[in-house]
Image: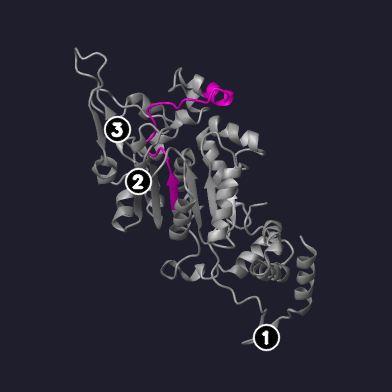
Amino acid sequence: MTQFSIAHLLITLIFAHPTLSNGQLQHPLLSSPRAPLPLVLWHGLGDNFAADGVNDVLDLASTIHPGTVTYAIRLGDDASSDRSSSFFGNTTRQIDAVCDAITSHPVLSKAPAIDALGFSQGGLLLRGMIQRCGDRVKVRSLVTFGSPHSGISTFKNCEPTDLLCQFAFGLLQGNTWSRFIQGRLVPAQYYRTLNETTGEPTEEYLDYSNLLADVNNERDGKNETYKDHLSRLDKFVMYRFEEEDAIIPPESTWFADVWQKPAPDGDEGMEGERIVTPLKERKMYEEDWLGLRKLDEKDALEFRTIPGKHMQIGKEVLRNAFKNYFGPLRESELRDEERVWTVQRLSELSCPLGIRVCLVAVQLSAEIKDSAGSHSDSLEDIHRWWGFRRDDY
């Protein structure tokens, strides 16, 4: 922190006195607008919570909506163990752990709702979190990029130097449906197979899938809680990449069903017909197993296409997503108990030094931001120290 910002902070602390208004103690900084909802991000396979790309995305979110408390979901104490957890682990336990982390977080747990951003498999896991613990974690908007909502039919190729990936996918070439694999290898838990003759899910998949068959409500006993929780979203937005090369089939990112029929007898070496059934023609939509039809009926379900290969997301795409789906609660979304989610309330939860000091820091940040460029680094310092833009808990 520069000498300028320290001096300015001290002067403001000395001279910014509280006043009385309508019989209540007021502070000149407490004219508080609505604060943006916190944003959680779940990264994809092979990534980690501390990666530069993840931090860049969260920084951009805080730039679009200043004051956003951001939280990168992590399943390990450090970047290496978190990356390993994207390959190895039981997704049931992982989702439970994330639910517990959010409900015990000093800011996320007090917010009227949070927004959720999922990259690749992280988007599927976030949806599973909403369905399974939506009674404890209220999510306003869920935005997913390249997420396998209908699973994968083929496992990805690993980079030659990525030994962790090669080891994981080497194990998957064995018995994918064994309890050992389904309980320990994350990508296996959203692998989906169809009967070549009928195009229906195979019995092995329905019986042994640890994640996808459950969160997609494909088994005979439908979980009505999943439908109730997911249909409460204000927005569920699914982005698909035009040149998707990691999620196979790519239509899975929009909940489509893809049946690759076998080649006709005598046509060896030829591929059979490829039949794509869009979400709105699937039984899961018609019978509304997940609440997707209900979301669609209230204009809360959006399908978007963007250029590029898997996870090649331009900044302008992210900017538009953040502007359109995240930020403060809109007036039409507010209930009485949610009107208290203001910058003041956020400051009380975020600032370890107390409300007055923290609000002064926010004021100082804004003034520094508008002053000469030589002081611009102080804004980042204050936001980092007081926990307004990055999760440090």
Identify the mark nearer the N-term, 3 or 2.
3
Q: Position of residue 136 (x, y in %)?
A: 51, 52
* Mark in the foreground, 1 or 2: 1
Q: Residue 271 versus residue 209: which sits nearer the camera?
A: 271
Residue ID for mark 3: 258
Q: Amino acid at mark 2?
A: Leu
Task: Calculate the distance from the C-alpha at mark 3 to the C-alpha at mark 2.
Answer: 19 Å
Check the image and name the residue furthest to the bottom: 22
Please tell me whether residue 11 is drawn above or below residue 298 in the rendered image. below
Which residue does the image show at 46% across and 69% down from the upper left?
Answer: 335
Q: Dot 3: what SS?
A: strand
In the rendered view, would you say 190 is above or below 308? above
- Tell me which segment is drawn in magenta: 142-168
Q: Residue at x 40, y 55 (%)?
A: 235
Q: How is the image coloured?
A: one colour
Residue tagged by mark 2?
290
Q: Main secondary structure of the magenta part?
A: loop
